[in-house]
């Protein structure tokens, strides 16, 4: 069985994974999720109203940030969410503020819940299995509390 | 020159799960508003319909649908879509034509029939659609967004789950005698806390349902209203439908991130603060003059956010206001005297118009069983998907 990211180009894997963002060549504004060429031209327009840039380069975001807020999913979300286990296991979610001035939503790492989180607390990026299909484990970035 | 237009009449169809066509609800509300105004349908020269977009399809071509159902009278038509702000945008369209002298009597109608079951994204794989990705990659539902905002309040300002529940208790009591409210039942803090946690810290009873319903207003020039014998009409003094200013620093449904503040710095006002501020500036009326507010309590905690966003108290102090009864009818600044979404459930294209109907009744002194005594200035507020939001300021 192999482990592959559930979506291409959003994060790196390995010991110290990073989120991948798009940085505007014109004004350096950073966006996450990264600009996708498949999604068509409109998504590549720079969001900065004083910039008409459409070209981006890929940059890594900081691995550590602070919790902006957090919650959990006590009930199984509807499709296209794919539950990893039967019966359904609730999981936590966190919005995390990175030094780049951007807040990014993600699930919280396996084994951690809302009791392990606090607004302002430090978390770091990990990559874990989201679900398993015919091709093996499909992985996703997650936030893990820093002890 | 004043930007005011007159509210000559208002009407609603009760909220519920009636399972009938949105056209029936809309016509019911429209006829009620026309009757309330005393203006015949034949005098209406503009119909603006609030529509809903369901699963990517503009399913309700609302302006013409209502105009035809009332019997073609030759009126011009327009149709608005602005998510939760749909009704306010429809009112703004009518107002602009009246102020430009291009219309004398406008009928604004919003109606919705909600689908059965859970609101879920479209079928099929859409790896470039954030609304699909948030479910596939994160399992991020709408209540989870509301829960993020609620938790932040609790960690930053020391609010508690009991405070959230108290919003529900207050609104349930306000809505008890509102004939248009769907849920009319006393609720206790214990009831809310005993309901299952959906997304921590929010319980099932902290989160609003979806409903069928319809609301309508008849707008005219102030001059026309006077000629028609309405000497002192409730006036629409401002309609704010501003969009966010880059960078938008709050995670809005269905997005997975905010804009970055690195290039431009955080704006002075958040999007929700800017929505209210624009209404105050347009009306030349400040938060200190507001007597009553109808705000979008998609969750109980969101009502507390709105009270601060609209500058009705300082940041972090909404719970103090709530606990001391100041946001209850009889208090300093009653919020959601109609019962709010807690008692109605959301009927998207009708809801912003329903907020205006309630405030019109309040300012006329006609809100039987839930009257805010002596109210002269009222304010609505809501925010929805895709950078839509609105605030309508009424005065008498
Ligand atoms: Zn740029």
Image: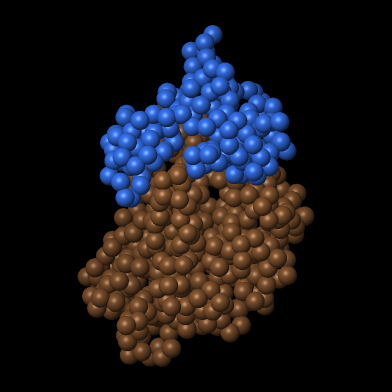
Chain colours: A blue, B brown
Q: Is residue B203 visible?
A: no
Between B135 and B282, the one lying in front of the other is: B282
Between A79 and A35, the one lying in front of the other is: A35
Instruction: Find the residue positioned furthest to the top.
Output: A1
Location of the N terminus of chain B (image quadrant): bottom left
In the picture, residue A20 is in which quadrant? top left
Q: Is residue B259 left or right of residue B117?
A: left
Count of number-bearing discs: 0
Q: Residue at x 34, y 59 (%)?
A: B80
Q: Is residue B6 visible?
A: yes
Q: Is residue B56 above or below residue B293?
A: above
Q: Residue at x 43, y 78 (%)?
A: B284
Q: Is residue A21 above or below residue B164?
A: above
Q: Is residue B35 above or below residue A49?
A: below
Coordinates of residue A135 in the picture (x, y in percent)? 48, 13
Q: Residue at x 28, y 63 (%)?
A: B78
Coordinates of residue A116 in the picture (x, y in percent)? 71, 36
Coordinates of residue B394 in the picture (x, y in percent)? 46, 76
Between B355 and A137, the one lying in front of the other is: A137
Q: Residue at x 30, y 65 (%)?
A: B67
Instruction: Find the residue positioned furthest to the right.
Output: B190
In the picture, residue B95 is in which quadrant? bottom left
């Amino acid at each position: 069985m192999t482990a592959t990211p559930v979506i291409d180009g959003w994060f790196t894997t390995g010991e110290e994974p990073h989120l991948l963002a798009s940085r505007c060549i014109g004004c350096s504004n950073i966006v996450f999720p990264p600009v996708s060429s498949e999604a068509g031209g409109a998504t590549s327009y720079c969001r900065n109203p004083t910039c008409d840039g459409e070209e981006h380069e890929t940059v890594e975001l900081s691995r550590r940030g602070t919790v902006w807020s957090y919650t959990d999913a006590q009930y199984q979300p509807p499709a296209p969410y794919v539950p990893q286990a039967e019966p359904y296991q609730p999981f936590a979610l966190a919005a995390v503020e990175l030094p780049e001035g951007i807040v990014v939503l993600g699930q919280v790492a396996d084994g951690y819940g809302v009791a392990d989180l606090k607004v302002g607390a430090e978390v770091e990026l990990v990559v874990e299995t989201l679900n398993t299909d015919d091709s093996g484990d499909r992985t996703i970035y997650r936030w893990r509390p820093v002890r | 020159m004043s930007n005011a237009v007159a509210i000559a009449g208002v009407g609603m169809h009760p909220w519920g799960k009636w399972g009938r066509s949105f056209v029936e609800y809309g016509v019911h509300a429209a006829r009620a508003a026309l009757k309330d105004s005393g203006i015949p349908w034949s005098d209406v020269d503009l119909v603006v319909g609030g529509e809903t977009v369901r699963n990517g399809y503009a399913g309700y071509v609302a302006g013409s649908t209502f105009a035809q159902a009332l019997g073609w009278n030759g009126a011009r038509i327009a149709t608005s879509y602005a998510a939760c702000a749909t009704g306010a945008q429809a009112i703004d369209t009518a107002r602009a034509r009246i102020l430009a002298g291009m219309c004398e009597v406008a009928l604004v109608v919003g109606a919705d029939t909600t689908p059965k079951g859970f609101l879920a994204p479209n079928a099929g794989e859409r790896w470039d659609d954030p609304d699909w990705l948030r479910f596939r990659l994160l399992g991020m539902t709408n209540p989870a967004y509301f829960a993020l905002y609620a938790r932040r309040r609790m960690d930053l300002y020391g609010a508690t789950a009991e405070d959230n529940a108290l919003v529900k208790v207050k609104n349930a009591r306000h809505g008890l005698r509102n004939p248009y409210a769907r849920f009319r039942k006393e609720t206790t803090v214990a009831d809310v806390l005993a309901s299952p946690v959906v997304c921590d810290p929010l319980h099932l009873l902290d989160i609003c349902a979806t409903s069928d319903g319809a609301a309508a207003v008849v707008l005219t020039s102030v001059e026309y209203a006077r000629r028609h014998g309405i000497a002192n009409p409730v006036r629409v003094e401002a309609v704010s439908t501003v969009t966010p200013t880059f960078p938008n620093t709050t995670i809005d449904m269905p997005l997975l991130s905010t804009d970055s503040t690195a290039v431009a710095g955080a704006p002075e006002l958040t999007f929700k603060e800017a929505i209210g501020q624009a209404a105050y500036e347009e009306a030349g009326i400040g938060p200190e003059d507001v007597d009553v507010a109808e705000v979008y309590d998609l969750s109980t905690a969101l009502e507390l956010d709105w009270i601060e966003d609209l500058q009705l108290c300082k940041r972090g102090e909404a719970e103090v206001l709530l606990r001391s009864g100041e946001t209850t009818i009889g208090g300093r600044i009653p919020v959601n005297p109609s019962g709010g979404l807690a008692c109605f459930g959301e009927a998207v294209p009708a809801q912003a118009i329903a907020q205006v109907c309630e405030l019109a009744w309040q300012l006329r002194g006609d809100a039987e069983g839930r009257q805010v005594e002596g109210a002269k200035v009222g304010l609505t507020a809501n925010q929805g998907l895709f950078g839509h939001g609105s605030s309508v300021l009424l005065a008498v």
